[in-house]
Image (cartoon, helix red, strand yellow):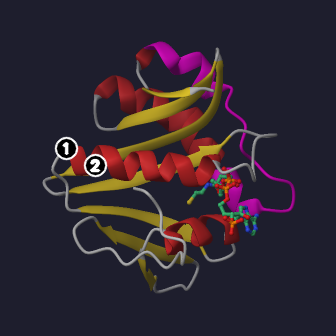
Amino acid sequence: MGEFRPLGREHRAQLEGFSCYRYRQPYTRPVEEIIRLYLPDALEQGSHEGIGFWEEEALLSVAAWREDPDTWHVACLAVADGNSRRGLGLRTKIEVLHRATEMGMRFVTSLVHYDNDGMIKINTRLGATMHPDAEREHLFCVIDLLNRYPTDPGGLAI
Ligand SMILES: CC(C)(COP(=O)(O)OP(=O)(O)OC[C@H]1O[C@@H](n2cnc3c(N)ncnc32)[C@H](O)[C@@H]1OP(=O)(O)O)[C@@H](O)C(=O)NCCC(=O)NCCS
């Protein structure tokens, strides 16, 4: 089963121990570092908000964002070790889009490494437009919550 719940200061220990580094995927290291080293303070100071997906007491996915007037900038989204490829990454991103829509946001942005095929696939399915950065290392992904064109032929109930 499991459920999404907001992240807060009470989750510091779980975030500091969260593992999402993937062998031979070096671009996953900074994501883990953001979650372990920066997110607990960012949540406590209120610069970021986030959600986690829990099964019982196990934290299986994390997403956090910073809010601008009409935009949520996703700082990290990750699925815990041992839980990938079961749809949780996609589900977590969809949950962020739902909540952003409810809060009256227009855009959800994120920065995705060029080699991160899983995250690129998720953003593509959710109708993101992607712009390469100057170094061609990351893609700046923008999801327009009002004008999305999901490319999933089956359509997504979101
Ligand atoms: C990237 C990440 C969030 C994907 O989460 P996930 O739960 O494994 O992804 P899902 O199961 O929801 O898969 C969504 C789609 O991506 C595909 N996919 C997932 N990982 C993939 C990979 N490594 N290579 C290719 N495709 C991949 C899935 O097959 C699925 O496609 P399908 O619906 O056509 O079958 C997860 O691997 C992760 O946490 N990585 C480490 C942290 C990270 O890189 N976060 C992103 C920061 S921008």
Give the numbered dot on residue 100.
2
Query: Horizontally, is 116 left or right of 137 in the view?
Result: right
Instruction: Please give the name of the residue rendered at 37% of the width and 46% of the height, measured from the top-left corner.
Output: 65
The quadrant in which the N terminus is found is: top right
**Residue 17 included in the magenta stretch of the image:** yes
**Residue 96 included in the magenta stretch of the image:** no
On the image, the x and y values in percent for residue 153 come to 54, 78
On the image, the x and y values in percent for residue 94 come to 45, 52
SS class of the residue under badge 2? helix
Instruction: Please give the name of the residue rendered at 61% of the width and 71% of the height, measured from the top-left corner.
Output: 121
Amino acid identity at mark 1: Met
Image vertical order of residue 56 relative to residue 111, above or below: above
Amino acid identity at mark 2: Ala
Stretch in magenta? 10-30
Is the C-beta separation of discs 1 and 2 under 8 Å?
Answer: yes
SS class of the residue under badge 1? loop
On the image, the x and y values in percent for residue 68 come to 19, 53
Q: Quadrant of residue 119?
A: bottom right
**Ligand 1 visible in quadrant:** bottom right
